[in-house]
Amino acid sequence: MGKKNADPQAVVRKLIKAGKVKKKCCRSSSRCKKCPVLALKKAKAAA
């Protein structure tokens, strides 16, 4: 999901700016593909 040394928040911020991820979580029961919460979790796992 990007560089290994980049902090997860910066990675997610970049994705939001690029329009790949939504700004706010819609808190759906099954998280959507554009969920910032899921994106942050993935970025933290990759770091």
Image: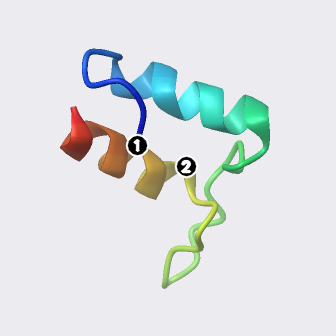
Residue at x 34%, y 40% (from the top left corner): 43
Residue at x 79%, y 44% (from the top left corner): 19
Question: Is label 1 in contact with label 2 (beta carbons under 8 Å)?
Answer: yes
Considering only vertical position in the picture, is 31 above or below 19? below
Name of the residue lying farthest toward the front: 3
In the figure, is residue 22 to the left or right of 43? right
Pointer 2 residue? 36
Considering only vertical position in the picture, is 38 above or below 28? above
Residue at x 40%, y 43% (from the top left corner): 40
Query: Pointer 1: residues within 10 angstroms few (<14), some, or many (20+)?
Result: some
Considering only vertical position in the picture, is 31 above or below 44? below
Query: Pointer 2: residues within 10 angstroms few (<14), some, or many (20+)?
Result: many
Which structural element holds mark 1?
helix
The quadrant in which residue 17 appears is top right
Name of the residue lying farthest toward the bottom: 30
- The label shown at residue 40 is 1
Which structural element holds mark 2?
helix
Residue at x 57%, y 59% (from the top left corner): 35
